[in-house]
């Protein structure tokens, strides 16, 4: 038997975009149902860089102090190694925000915090283990979502459906929204290694001819991202796990004594990188945001923050129409118009880095420190520019929705 639920807004996807939008709408008194297909948020290999722009939003909501009580590490500078030379690329200590750092917080802790906060509002309904599998339509307008749960089928009728179900979005596929594939030359292998007390403190990246790796300090372990040419995973595996461990040791010699922690390929997860965006983010009754609207490269770790900015913009534009039960196509188009320029500008920067740096690295060309990076070493004050681009971004959003208790 199918359970039937009626609400103002149904959000498919309990990631950063979906949870933040759910919180903001519930806070504004709008009945909202959020569907999350998993039983919890405990999944590795999700973005966990909470940038100053997102921390500003927490401050605007009056949640910052509580948020920062959650376990996290603070990154004030981004450093890297190009060949044998150590460089500093970004310095967040001078960005014009309250928090002058990037908070490294496992995404499950971030999402748990948002969920706990949203549950304070009676109009918030989070359904775990509820997977959106299709749309309900009436004369070409989306009027709801079909979902599957362990207890049976679920039909949610809503004034607005929001697809926030990631880069492999079921809802955008069901809606037949056209996607432009911008392309990415790399994939990423994610794995973790234990962290020792005498290890370096900072998060850093290492680039040299044919190889690139980033190590994120998560306190008691390193989250490692080893970048490979797109589609090359089978060739890498054919060389054997010992060869891969030797390559990691060559990139970061201080972890050589613990590489037996990668005991088989199950400890290494392939993340397929995609950069794309929808030609149009909406259909009558449906809006896509976050990765469902625009998949981002992992460059800069900006994907989670861009998704959250989408959610804030959507709430700012739609909370009152949803509250009044009068959402128009013009309202949905206004969200897309607001967020198109930041999305395109960010993707342009990412593609430029892909083409000028990552493609060259993966092709095996000898790495030299680019002139612009040299300039950052000669004039340290300039490091605030990349810090602003990464940490604040293009056209940051601010909370405009009211709180209705």
Image (tube, helix red, strand yellow):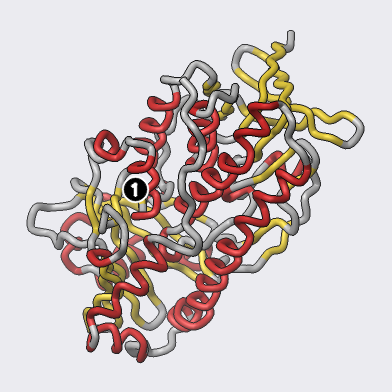
Q: Is residue 376 left or right of residue 220?
A: right
Q: Is residue 167 left or right of residue 108?
A: right
Quarter where residue 392 is shown: bottom left
What element does badge 1 sit on?
helix
Please identify the residue farthest to the top as the structure is shown: 1
Residue at the image point whose x is 8% and y is 58% from the top: 198
Q: Nearer the viewer, residue 7 or 208?
A: 7
Please identify the residue farthest to the left as the structure is shown: 198
Label 1: how many Cα within 10 Å (few below 14, some 14–19, many 20+): many
Residue at the image point whose x is 66% and y is 45% from the top: 288
Disc 1: which residue = 55
Q: How many numbered marks are there?
A: 1
Q: Is residue 57 left or right of residue 383?
A: right
Q: Position of residue 304 (x, y in %)?
A: 46, 50
Q: Nearer the viewer, residue 387 or 156?
A: 387
Q: Position of residue 228 (x, y in %)?
A: 46, 68
Residue at the image point whose x is 77% and y is 50% from the top: 177
Residue at the image point whose x is 27% and y is 53% from the top: 99
Image quarter of the N terminus: top right
Residue 270 seen in the current view: no
Q: Is residue 69 above or below residue 118?
A: below
Q: Position of residue 30 (x, y in %)?
A: 59, 25
Q: Is residue 371 above or below residue 282?
A: below
Q: Is residue 371 above or below residue 238?
A: below
Q: Position of residue 145 (x, y in %)?
A: 72, 28
């Amino acid at each position: 038997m199918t359970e039937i639920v009626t609400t103002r807004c149904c959000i498919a996807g309990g990631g950063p975009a979906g949870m933040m939008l759910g919180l903001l709408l519930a806070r504004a008194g709008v009945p909202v149902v959020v569907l999350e297909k998993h039983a919890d948020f405990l999944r590795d290999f999700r973005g966990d860089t909470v940038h100053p722009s997102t921390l500003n939003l927490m401050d605007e909501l009056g949640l910052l102090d509580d948020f920062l009580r959650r376990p996290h590490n603070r990154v004030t500078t981004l450093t890297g190694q190009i060949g044998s030379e150590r460089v500093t690329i970004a310095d967040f200590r001078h960005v014009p925000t309250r928090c002058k750092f990037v908070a490294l917080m496992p995404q499950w802790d971030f999402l748990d915090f948002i969920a706990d906060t949203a549950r304070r509002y009676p109009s918030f309904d989070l359904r775990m283990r509820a997977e959106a599998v299709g749309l309900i339509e009436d004369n070409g307008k989306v009027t709801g979502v079909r979902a599957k749960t362990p207890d049976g089928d679920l039909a949610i009728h809503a004034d607005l459906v929001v697809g926030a179900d990631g880069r492999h979005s079921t809802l955008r596929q069901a809606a037949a929204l056209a996607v432009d594939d911008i392309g990415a030359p790399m994939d990423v292998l994610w794995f973790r290694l234990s962290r020792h007390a005498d290890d370096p403190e900072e998060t850093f990246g290492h680039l040299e001819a044919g190889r690139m790796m980033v190590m994120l300090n998560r306190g008691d372990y390193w989250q490692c991202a080893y970048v490979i040419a797109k589609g090359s995973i089978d060739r890498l595996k054919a060389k054997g796990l010992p060869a891969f461990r030797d390559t990691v040791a060559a990139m970061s010699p201080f972890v050589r004594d613990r590489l037996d922690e990668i005991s088989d390929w199950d400890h290494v997860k392939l993340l397929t990188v995609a950069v794309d965006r929808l030609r149009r983010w909406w259909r009558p009754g449906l809006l896509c945001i976050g990765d469902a609207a625009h998949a981002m490269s992992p460059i800069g770790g900006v994907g989670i923050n861009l998704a959250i900015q989408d959610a804030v913009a959507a709430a700012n534009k739609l909370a009152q129409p949803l509250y009044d039960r009068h959402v128009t196509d013009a309202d949905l188009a206004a969200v897309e118009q607001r967020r198109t320029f930041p999305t395109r500008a960010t993707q342009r920067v990412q593609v430029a880095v892909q083409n000028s740096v990552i493609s060259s690295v993966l092709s095996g060309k000898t790495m030299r420190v680019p002139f612009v990076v040299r300039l950052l070493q000669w004039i340290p004050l300039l490091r605030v520019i990349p810090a602003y681009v990464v940490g604040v971004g293009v056209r940051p959003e601010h909370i405009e929705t009211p709180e209705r208790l």
